[in-house]
Amino acid sequence: MIVLIKLILAHFFGDFLLQPKSWVEEKEIKKAASTKLYLHILIHGLLVMLVLWGFNYWLIALLIMILHGVIDAIKLYAQKESNKPLWFLIDQGLHILSILVLWMLFFSPDINFASWQENPNVWIYTTALLFISVVSGILMKELMLSWSTALNDSNEESLNNAGKYIGMLERIFVFTFVVTGNWEGIGFLLAAKSVFRFGDLKESKDRKLTEYILIGTLLSFGIAIATGIVTLKLIEIKP
């Protein structure tokens, strides 16, 4: 496992610490004609050799260089100004995946996937996380539909889908606090949200909006707390 950590560390160094913004801008303009692209790829290979500290690992270093170059080239030609964040995530995901595959091929780690599949805790946590992130968001939307349409705040400026992702992160944080026994974190999160919302509510002076936010917050926290408690009961751990 330590080898995998070293390979990921080398990737982070090469992609974030040792890649100046000017290199990124040149690659986006010149694409495959950019000399910085090939220098960037070479640095990744050298970093792999450095963290593994042995010339006998030249083949995995070479393969990581090739795969890194191919993935970067695909990103450079596929991304547009409107989808840069998406391609950043795809790019990093493919890099980590390629490192993981090469690690498994070269070092044959003893990973028992069958034991993970048979472990009930894996399925319990997976189900709980899916519920509090996606399912409960849709559930809350349906439960509060009549109130949200009554607000008629379409003229209010807001980031696209911001509320959806805030609620999702909020429930994941609360769920994490419950299953780890850090109940005080829930109070801190609730207080922080109240502080951020206080200005909006004070300026709007809209009782309906205040009631809507309060109901949504309590419902979101309640679902996350209940899910956490049920999860702990299912894995036979006292909260």
Image (spheres, rainbow, N blue to C red):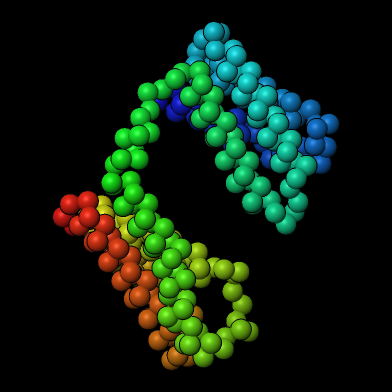
The percent position of residue 105, horizontal first and vertical second, equals 51, 21
The percent position of residue 40, horizontal first and vertical second, equals 68, 28
Which residue is at the front of the view, 172 or 205? 172
Q: Which residue is drawn at 38% across and 67% down?
A: 192
Exactly how many numbered labels are in the figure?
0
Image: 88 above or below 170:
above
The percent position of residue 33, horizontal first and vertical second, equals 83, 31
Q: In this view, does 115 lie to the left or right of 210?
A: left
Which residue is at the front of the view, 239 or 117? 117
Image: 44 above or below 196:
above
Quarter of the N terminus within the rendering: top left
Q: Residue at x 79, y 27 (%)?
A: 35
Q: Is residue 14 left or right of residue 233?
A: right
Q: Residue at x 20, y 57 (%)?
A: 233
Quarter of the C terminus within the rendering: bottom left
- In terms of image quadrants, where is residue 5? top left
- In terms of image quadrants, where is residue 144? bottom left
The percent position of residue 48, horizontal first and vertical second, equals 55, 20
Which residue is at the front of the view, 167 or 123? 123
Q: Residue at x 28, y 60 (%)?
A: 228
- In terms of image quadrants, where is residue 194? bottom left
Q: Is residue 35 left or right of residue 1?
A: right
Residue 130, can we see it?
yes
Image: 5 above or below 143:
above
Residue 43, can we see it?
no
Q: In this view, does 132 lie to the left or right of 230?
A: right
